[in-house]
Structure formats: structure tokens, C-alpha cells
Image: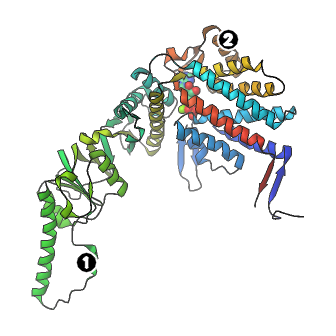
Amino acid sequence: MFIMSEDSQRTQGRDAQSSNIMAGKAVAEAVRTTLGPRGMDKMLVDSGGEVVITNDGATILNEMDIEHPAAQMIVEVSESQEEEVGDGTTTAAVIAGNLLGEAEDLIEQDVHATTIVEGYHEASEIALEAIAEQVNEADVDDEILKQVGESSMTGKGTGGLTAESLAETVVEAIRHVETDDGVARDNVTVHTQIGASSNATELVPGIVLDEEPAHDSMPREVEDASIAVLDVELGVRTGDIDAEYAIDSIDQLNTAIDAEESEVRGYAEDVAESGADVVITTDDVDDRVSSYLASEGILVFENVGNSDARDIVSATGARRVGALEDLEEADFGAADRIRAENFGDDDLAFIEGGAAAETVTVFVRGGTEHVVDELERAIGDALDVVATALASGEVVPGAGATEIAIADKIREEAAGIEGRKQLAVTAFADAIDIVPRTLAANTGQDPIDALVDLRAAHESEGRAGLITTGEDVTIDDPFEHGVVDPADVKREAIESATEAATMIVRIDDVIAAE
Ligand code: ADP
Ligand code: MG
């Protein structure tokens, strides 16, 4: 009896397990070489010829257009890592892949999937304890935050700009949006603009929008601006144009034109009299209104997108007004300075200071599209990790040191675990070794030798990572070299990798509709 469509494909038992495991491992393998400060970049070309050059694990997996369902689950590990903590996407995918690899060996030794799953869960609990033990006792100050930001950007294409100077900008941005209720990460935006060297990257105390003044003779800069934000068309309503006028004499035509002129002038005067010196509307502004307002020294932006209008409102404290007659001073937003600037083919509006200062923008410059795109991703990651570290106040040593400590603690505790589950717990520790091994391999070192040396140093010194500084690779305490990661990044990587790997291992029947 057939209960499924004849076209559906079914794989069962070991075959299902091993094909899933292989797919998951392949995904992790794909990003392995990008891990760490010496990680290489990937160039991804989509079917439309669009090119992305990146070192970012989540971006790579996202662009790869992966179809295999088990492989897709590893992609999701990396995506949830990006969403939750903003960094560690490669680490999480690589750990997940290695957990699958170790599981495959266990299955071959006839360890049952449920035993593997239990062992992995138990090991991940020990890993979380180990992470807690690694947390830096010192307060997370600006110096440490800068190190966190810098560590997350080392090895990324930062367009020749040092990770150090970028990290300074990142910390300044995050400090700016720190409130009593925590870090308002969403109040930091990144705006990219090509055409200058990445050195010109700066922090704007406000927002940057792709908008240009409605009229050439308007002021390009207004200080202490009172800003009206309108959803109003300033001109003869487009809807009115359809109305038919039966005009059969010049007089009537002139009357009609006069009526229109006075309507238009009326709008302009209403706006001018309101006292606003900057007007932003989501609708059209008639040229005659623009030119009148320009002569009154008022700066107008027309056809502003809805989301830009929302940003302006939240940055300036303005209230959006739907009808001119309702406009009053209480609706105005405030900014220390609004300026329009031209960058080649692009016009940008900068709204700075005043109430606007609640939001800040990292204004990223770079010579080409690829440079600014990768800078934007690197800065986005750095903003996330600095915000994460500031919010939790917990950082751990990077450069593989935390992973060495995790594996060590798991092996130690595995001794007290009975039966075959012990094999699974130990296998988890072996899987975690992938991080220091890969960091070593990506710096051209022998991974086995490096691992042995790291373990020995961990044994004698406590904290031991494989530190890359310029051309040098040394084993030392990462805290001494400012190589630090937020504890939450490590926790999330362990948790999401364990979850995906155990889910995949448990599957022994794959039914796919064609
Ligand atoms: P992920 O996508 O997982 O964040 P990265 O390519 O950003 O991958 O690499 C992160 C790893 O690189 C972390 O383990 C971090 O501690 C390590 N790292 C960062 N800076 C250094 C450094 N100077 N030396 C050695 N390791 C470093
Ligand atoms: Mg990173």
C-alpha cells in the first residue's frame, strides 16, 4: 500500500543520518577558512552576476543559497547567532559541523543517537559553566569595549583603516545610546557612502538621509532648526487637476490661474508664518511654493520616504501633521544643525544634535561599493558585540582560549559520566577543539602542535590563546593582548550549535516531496 505520492523520495536509517550529517559538515567546511584574524575572504557571485566579497560567516551562508534541509539548519545556526548577538557566526557553524562529524564517528561505533543527544546536552551544560569561569573579573570599561570591537573586526576587510580607530568610533556610538534602561542599539545606524577613503568614516551625532533640498536656492545649512514634518502636499492638489473647468473666455482663464496662484501662495505663506525653518513632507511641493519658501530662507525636503520621516520624527521629537491648518509650534522638532551635502551623484541630509542626538550614525566612507559593504558588515558586528558586552558586562578571552578551557573542563568531568554517554561527552570536547585548531590552521600553523602547546599553556598559565599580532603568532593570555569576546557570543554559539547538531542526529527518516 502506498501512503505517499509516488514522486516523493524517502531515505531511512543510517543512510538518512549520514546524508544529513554530510550536508551539515559540508556547510561548516565552507566557512572554516574565514575564521579568525587570518581568515580569508570569499567572493560570492549570484546568478545575476552580483558580487559580494566577505569574511562574514552569516553573509556567506546566506548568499550560498543552500537547499539541503539539514545544511539549511546549520545556516540557521549562523543566522540566529547573527540575530541574537551579532557575531560568532563562523564559530557557531564550524562547531555545529564538527559536532556532526564527531556524531558520525560515534554512530559508526554503534552509539545510539539518543545517547549522543544526551551526552551533547550534558557537555553543553559543562561548557556554559566553563564560560562563566572564564569571564573577566575587571569591569567592562571603554578600554575593554574597544578591545571587544577591535577583536571582532580583526581580519575583516576594513579598507585599510585600522580596526583600532574604527573600534573607537564604535564604542563612542554605543556609549552615546546607553540609557538607564540599557543599550538602545537600534539608535545607532550605519550609513554608507562611497567616494572617499575609509579614513573619512566618522560619527554623526544624528541621522543621515538620502534626501536633497526641494529648491536649489534654499539654504544648505540651518542652525538651531525648528522642523515641521508634514504629510501634506504643498501645491494645487493633484486630485483637482482632473476636475474640468468650462473655460470660454480669457477672463475666466485668468481668474482660474489667479485662484490657483493664490492657493499656492496661501500654502507658502501658511508654512512661512508657522515659524518652521525646515519643512519635511512626505508629499509633493509645488515649484512655486518651493521658490517662495526658498526666498524666505526655509529649507524644504519633499517626497521624503515614510521610513525616513519616521526616523526624523524619532530623532527630532517632531509630531507628524496631516493638515497645514493643524500645524502649530508644539509639533516642531528640534535639531542643532541640518545640512544638505552633495557627494558626487548623491545628495545627503544630515540632521544633527538637539533632540536628534539620541540617535547616532556611523557614516561609513570607502572607495568602492565592495569596500563600504564589507565595512558596513564589520562595523555592524562590532556595534553588536560592544553593545552585548556593555549590556551583560561579561567578556571572555578570545583567540581560542575560552574553547581550550571549555574542552578541558568537559574532559575532566567526562571521567565521572557512566557508560557510552561518556564517549559522547568527550566527543563534544573534541568538537570544540575545532576553534583553536582552525585559528592555528588559518595562520599557517600545524593544528595538532598548536593544540598541544595551547593545552600545556592552559594547564600552567590558566588562560592561553593563539594570539595573532601583525605577522606574529604567539601563545599567551589573550587579555594581555586585548583579544576579548563577549561571553554571550560564546554561549550562544555553544547553545545554537548543540541544538542544531542534536536535531540533525535524531533524524532517521527523510521524506521529501518532489
Ligand atoms: P566569527 O564569525 O565566528 O566571529 P571571526 O572570523 O570573526 O569569526 O573570528 C573570530 C575569532 O577570532 C574569535 O575566536 C576571536 O577570539 C578570534 N580573534 C580575534 N582577534 C584575534 C587575534 N588578534 N588573535 C587571535 N584570535 C583572534
Ligand atoms: Mg567575528
Residue 489 on image: x %, y %: 55, 31
Q: Distance between the residues labelled 1 and 2?
A: 83 Å
Q: What residue type is labelled 1?
A: Asp
Circle count: 2
User: Any mark on residue 240, and which?
Assistant: 1
Specify the farthest residue to the bottom. 248
Residue 51 on image: x %, y %: 54, 48
Q: Which amino acid does label 2 sit on?
A: Ala
The answer to whether 104 is drawn above or below residue 348 in the figure is above
Q: Quadrant of the N terminus?
A: bottom right
Q: In which quarter of the image is the C terminus?
A: bottom right
Query: Is residue 25 visible to us here?
Result: no
Which residue is nearer to you in this view: 17 or 199? 17
Which residue is nearer to you in this view: 327 or 255? 327
Q: Provide the secondary structure element on which disc 1 rests.
A: helix
Q: Residues within 10 Å of mark 2 (few under 14, many from 20)?
A: few
Side of 420 relative to 43 (left or right): right
Residue 420: quarter of image: top right
Earlier sequence position, callout 1 versus callout 2: 1
Tell me what residue is drawn at x 26 percent, y 78 percent.
241
Query: Is residue 245 visible to us here?
Result: yes
Residue 269 on image: x %, y %: 12, 63
The answer to whether 42 is drawn above or below residue 255 in the figure is above
Specify the farthest residue to the top. 460
Specify the farthest residue to the right. 1
Residue 142: quarter of image: top left
The answer to whether 347 is drawn above or below residue 410 in the figure is below
Question: Which label lies toward us, 1 or 2?
Answer: 1
Which residue lies under the disc numbered 2?
Answer: 456
Q: How crowded is mark 1: few (under 14 residues within 10 Å), some or many (20 or more)?
A: few
Ligand 1 falls in quadrant: top right
